Amino acid sequence: MACFRGNCDEFYGEVLLLDERKMTLTAEQGFKKSSKAAAILNQVFSHLDIPDVKFFGLRFCDGEQQTHWLDPLKTLSQHRDLVGPPFIFYFGVKFYVKHASKLKEETTRYQFYLQVRQDVRQGRLPCPPASRPRLSALMLQAERGDRQEARPPDSEEDQEVQRIYKSLRGVSRPQAQRLLLSLCSSLRMFGVSLFAAYGENQTEYFLGPTPVGVVIYRDKELVGKYYWQRINKIHFKNETFELRTVGRNGAETSFFFHTLHRSVCKRLWRSCVEHHVFFRMSELNPSPWKLKHNSFARSPSLSLSLPRLTMVLLRNKTIHNKTTTTEQRPKQHSSASTPPPNRRANIPSKAMAAPPAVHRCARERRASDNNPTHGRGVDKNILRVM
């Protein structure tokens, strides 16, 4: 293997695509460790002929097998956790959209289909038992079309899959892909990335960004859901993560959580910041746009001052009179092993009160205002590592 010390310019890398093909990256193509990550992204987008580049990115695994997204504005050598050579990158969807089946560009929609198919197969997107036969049948139709292979069913579920598969005869593969995307978009954990964190009395939570906002789970139950429009600050310091939201009456509420390592806290912060900026900008400019490979704010404290939609402005006229009551809870150290930093889960449907790790503004008087989306659960399943 080549080394990169001194004047050594040898380079070798691979990009694993969603259809299981590989792209090779070599020095002969002009790539080196001092190349911007955007150059590799552009090569991939050109190879796949993807016009809507804003949804996608490249990930890599560090020495501890934790995943990171490449920052397009940084050079490869500036990614300190990047391991290689050989350098291995994984192409995939970074920003899921709520209605993926309605994407206009066929190549973009096809990449979403490949990503969702991978999520289902690898257990990152749990499916309720009632929907599983139809999901499996749609996968068969999307991959095989009407070329049905006769084989004896092994179970009642297999029988149901074959029955639905036969009923889909005549449905084109692209249409089956859209139907699969529509079904998967309705699942609770579609596009959800969860990080482990701790609150009061070392209670374990899982929280992270979704296409519509930030969700918080405890004991496999949804205990909080906060839309991007109501989040106005995302902050971290060391192992402490803060999420600040604005209630309907204009009052602010801050949520504090702790992670076992600063690196996990920073990844949680970065993921929330990037999703917030992406989806708020998409709301303000819903027409198709090409992403210029921008890096998001580097500051660990981001006050999000994007213009609000008219409807939100009308509801938040009192925001200039808001009062904030937050308190910083002292850190509690735990001897527990480091939890996986990024999980997707399928959680029971029981509704609960807001997590005690959250310090609420006038909690008893304004519970419904400050937590307008709380109480929506999902189907039972176990937490799965992403």
Image: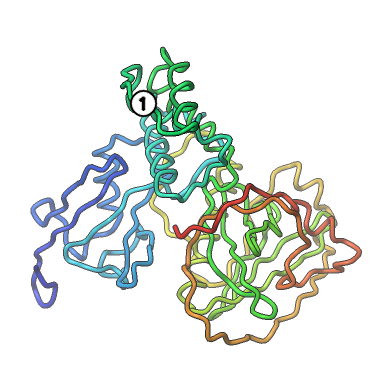
Residue 353 place in picture, x, y as percent: 78, 62
Q: Looking at the image, which is closer to me, 73 or 269?
A: 269
Total count of labels:
1
User: Who's the residue at 9% across and 64% down the image?
Assistant: 10
**Quarter in which the N terminus is drawn:** bottom left
Tell me: residue 370, above or below residue 124: below
Residue 6 place in picture, x, y as percent: 10, 77
Tell me: residue 343, above or below residue 308: below
Give the side of residue 330 with respect to residue 89, left or right.
right
User: Who's the residue at 67% across and 58% down the image?
Assistant: 221
Residue type for callout 1: Pro
User: Who's the residue at 62% across and 50% down the image?
Assistant: 380
Tell me: residue 161, above or below residue 61: above
Residue 63 place in picture, x, y as percent: 30, 72
Q: Residues within 10 Å of mark 1 (few under 14, many from 20)?
A: few
Give the side of residue 186 with respect to residue 349, left or right.
left
Q: Looking at the image, which is closer to me, 68 or 176?
A: 176
Residue that extends furthest to the right in the rendered view of this protein: 365
Which residue is label 1 attached to? 152
Residue 367 place in picture, x, y as percent: 84, 60
User: Who's the residue at 81% across and 63% down the image?
Assistant: 251
Identify the image quadrant of residue 158. Answer: top left
Q: Looking at the image, which is closer to me, 133 or 244?
A: 133
Q: Secondary structure at mark 1?
A: loop
Q: Looking at the image, which is closer to me, 286 or 357?
A: 357
Identify the image quadrant of residue 290. Answer: top left
